[in-house]
Amino acid sequence: MNKLFILSVFCFLGSVSRGADFRITCASPREYASIWSEKDKVYLAVANAEGFQELPVYTGPVTANNFSVVRGGLNDLKELNGNIMVSWEKSKCTQDLKSPMLMKCNGEGTVLMPKTKVAVKSFSLGTSLLNQHSMDFDYDSFNINWGVDREGMHYLVTFNYGKDFCKVK
């Protein structure tokens, strides 16, 4: 029993990285995003040629009941203007070594840019892989999910890319 427990712990620890440097990069014709670790920090950088007009302020079905949240995101996040850089202490982040495109950071990050008039805070970053399977096609996508707080409101900003537009090192 103890041997099985010890083996399980080693398998679990082997699937999560806290110290190795990594880089996940996605590029589309209008947008570039990268998550990387360097020394004791993990960074998120996003640059979009269209600026704020292309910043995804809401993910999910838009209904009459949640339209105020969408409108709030449009107002609250417009200062981000499509060029973003945030960092977290590496100790707050983990990466799945079995699926290295999957990672997360929990806890407060530091918004390095842009500098805004009203404070923008970040408390989460994570990635996800999605597969849409139908009779006509299979489509794999990669999401970067960034939790943003501003003036008491929380927004989940999701940058979506076709998995083929992303690579990990």
Image (spheres, rainbow, N blue to C red):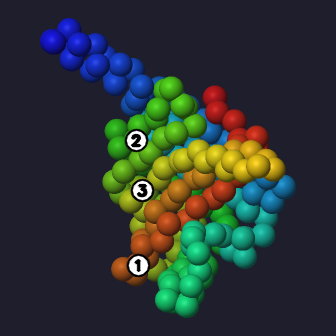
- In the picture, the quarter occupied by the C terminus is top right
Based on the displayed image, in which of its 4 quarters is residue 67 positioned? bottom right
Q: Are marks 1 and 2 in contact (CB under 8 Å)?
A: no
Q: Earlier in the sequence, mark 3 or mark 1?
A: 3
Asked which secondary structure carries label 1, the reply is strand
User: Percent x, y for residue 155?
Assistant: 48, 71
- Distance of mark 2 from mark 3, alpha carbons? 10 Å
Q: Which residue is mark 1?
A: 153
Q: Circle 3 sits in a helix, a strand or a loop, which is it?
A: strand
Name the N-terminal-most of marks 2 and 3.
2
Residue 106, horizontal then vertical, whole percent? 36, 51
- Residue 142 horizontal side relative to residue 110, left or right: right
Q: Which residue is mark 3?
A: 124
Callouts 3 and 1 close, C-beta under 8 Å: no
What is the number of the mark on residue 52? none
Q: CA distance from mark 3 to mark 1?
A: 14 Å
User: Does residue 162 show up?
Assistant: no
- The count of marks equals 3
Relative to 14, say whether 91 is above or below: below
Q: Is residue 13 visible?
A: yes
Disc 1/disc 2 C-alpha distance (Å): 23 Å
Which is nearer the eye, 118 or 4?
4
Instruction: Name the amino acid type tagged 1.
Output: Met
How many neighbours does mark 1 have within 10 angstroms: few (below 14), some (14-19), or many (20 or more)?
few
Q: In the rendering, at what x and y percent does residue 31 appear?
A: 75, 57
Mark 3 Cα within 10 Å, few/some/many (few <14, many 20+)? many
Residue found at x 40% / y 29%: 16
Three-letter amino acid code of the residue under disc 3: Ser
**Disc marking residue 93:** 2
